Image (tube, rainbow, N blue to C red):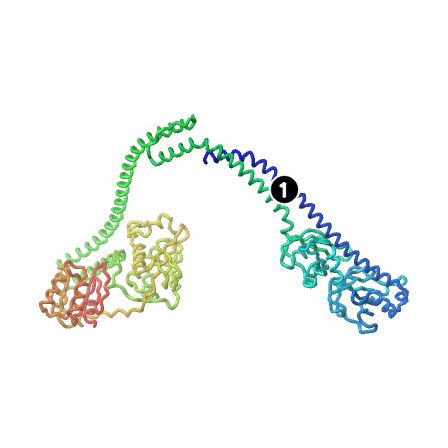
Amino acid sequence: MRIRSRLLLLMLSILLPAFAIASVAVWYVYKEQRAAEVAGMQEAARALALLADRELQTKEAVLRTLAASPAMQEGDLASVYRHARALVPAAEGTIVVHDLTGRQLFNTRQPYGSPPAVGRSNLMLLRQAAGPRATVVSDLFHAPVGKRYDVALQIPVVVGDALRYYLSMGLAVERVAPLLGQQGVPANWVVSLLDRRGTVIARSRDAARYIGRQVSPGLRARIAASPAGVHHGVRLDGTATVAFYSRAPMSGWTVVMSVPVAEMRRPAFVAAAGLGLLVSVVLLLAIGAARIYARGTAAPIEQLRQAAERLGRDEPVTPFASGVTEADAVSAALADASARIRDSKAHLERRVTEAVAAAERAQRALLQGQKLEALGRLTAGIAHDFNNILQTLSGALQLIGLTDDRARVQALAATCQKAIGRATTLTGQMRAFGTVQDARLETVQPDQALASTLPMLRSALPGTVQLELDVAPGLWAVTIDPLQLELALLNLVINARDAMPDGGRLYLAMRNEQLAQGAQGLAPGPYVRIELRDSGTGMTPETLARALEPFFTTKPVDKGTGLGLPQAYAFATQSGGMLAMQSAPGAGTTVTIRLPRAAANGAAPAAAASMSAAAAGPILFVDDDPLVRATMVEALTVAGFDVTAAASGDEALARLEAGCPVRHVVSDIVMPGTLDGIGLANVVAERFPDVRVVLATGHTERRVSLPGVRLLAKPYDIAQLFAALEQR
């Protein structure tokens, strides 16, 4: 904050308390005046209510005079009728005589002897509550004879000591309205007379428009709660008002005086505006005086500010002499600090550079260590399993060379086939961590795939684990590697089994799911949801965080490989879906797999042909591995094919261009040279359209989408190759 601002605040700290005291005084006076105004308004409403009662008392006196007349005492109703018509003209009101049951005997608005009209006033109901000898004033009603709004006053007629008749006077409400209009209230104030139900009897403004209408429920409730008071609300014409009301003791009617809120607040607005103007003028004068005084004292402070800015920009600061001792001392201190900061900055930059370099080296070392740890676990696991497979193959092959017994040789060959099957399963698990292979993709029904795998799943569970299936009908087809799905389900079931050593329940569900919004990296769309939920021991957050790492396991060395959950996760992601896990200690584990719906149903895979159904025609076999090339050339030759071998795509193309007779090309995909298997297939399709192509691969990063080209996944049976050669 600038020094000039501080001087201004100093002056305001002196002036503002005085202004606050003056404001409190003005507010106190305003409150007192407001209270006096409210009291005056309430008194005015009470006076108007009493005025209404006095007007009714005048009418009551007329009725009592008529009741005491000799004709009424003698029961000469015809004479009473003539006297009543002369006493109260029909334009001003009406006189009605009732018997004690409420039956009308005559009405001065009707000829004497006419059939009595059905009255609509509530006089008799009110009399039941007030008693037979009380004076009763009705609420507003619509007179059936006069066809207008009336109010009525009724007294008992006593002849001797006995109650004989009820004498009533009906008054047109038009005669009551002038009573309110003559009170001299301001033009925008409204005085209303209400009956017991809150219905307008008379009104000082626009009476004809509002007579017969009820006031707001809030005001009616307030009037019913207390005989006098104040109500803040909205008038019938929509104006926000403060209403002062008072109930007349005789009639039970209520006088309401409505004053617009703006008029009630006007004194406060005038006082606040005057005070605000006074405060503004004084403040402006004080600010002007402070600016004049501060202008001469702020220059050294401004110089110090500029020196501080130069210090912040790392520019050299020189001291100055202003004549103000404190400012000169600060200037000298800033200059000294500038010199020291520049020296310290150079030293700090050197240390920061060294620290950053050391941190980067440590981070690289940490990342490298983590990579080597993961790679070590992966290669150790692969080496362990493959060494067991190689040991089995090596022992069996050595025994084959030591025996001439054909049955023994066939048994050893079967052992080799089992070892190869184990190797295929292991490579299938490892393949799940790479890209998806087109050669193994099929469009299948998930429920059918589950049905074929179910016996294997049940055999993996002990009798203490109950398997519950919940497979919804009409599941969508999915495009996946069926072997990987079976392997994923088996791995998840085995993990659930190991988590329930004492038995439990395993719930397996399949159902269609339409994702309206993307979740966990999935796009919105149709998916098949596979859910496995066990009641096992669950996992800690630390174990759950590492559960999908390859070769990470909490089981003993001889119980698990650490590839089950990673294989299932890799299968789901490579199929275009996802795998999610939820688990907590003691709460079991839930694994959810979502697989995208297939774009179209694929054709069922062709059945494998027998070795005796070999197709005719010369074959060009292309593979860069000499062992594979020698084995398959021998097998195809034995099957009756004329086989030509090539070690690369370039060599195969050269043989084709040289005119080598070829009916089929069987080629590996990944090969050295300028042409791999896919490139060779493209060239053959363009230049040799009569030659059919079969591609085989163990793994490739490229997607294969070539019409008319068959795909085989290594390792494949010789019968599968024959079937591929026969398909058209």
The crowd level at tag 1 (other Cα within 10 Å; few <14, some 14-19, many 20+) is some
Quarter residue 404 falls in? bottom left
Quadrant into which the C terminus falls: bottom left
Residue at screen point 68% across, 51% down: 230
Picture coordinates of residue 645 (x, y %)? Answer: 11, 64
Left or right? Give the position of 332 relative to 407.
right
Left or right? Give the position of 144 relative to 69.
left
Q: Foreground: 693 or 319?
A: 319
Picture coordinates of residue 198 (x, y %)? Answer: 70, 59
Left or right? Give the position of 300 relative to 340.
right
Residue 185, above or below 80: above
Quadrant into which the N terminus falls: top left
Q: Foreground: 487 or 570?
A: 570
- Residue 129 in view here: yes
Quarter residue 88 falls in? bottom right
Residue 337, above or below 224: above
Picture coordinates of residue 256 (x, y %)? Answer: 70, 55
Q: Foreground: 468 or 589?
A: 589
Residue at screen point 40% across, 50% down: 585
* Amino acid type at mark 1: Trp
Residue behind mark 1: 27
Q: Foreground: 585 or 123?
A: 123
- Residue 224 in view here: no
Count of marks overlaid on the render: 1
Find numbered disc 1 in the image and state the secondary structure of the residue it sits on: helix
Picture coordinates of residue 418 (x, y %)? Answer: 22, 60
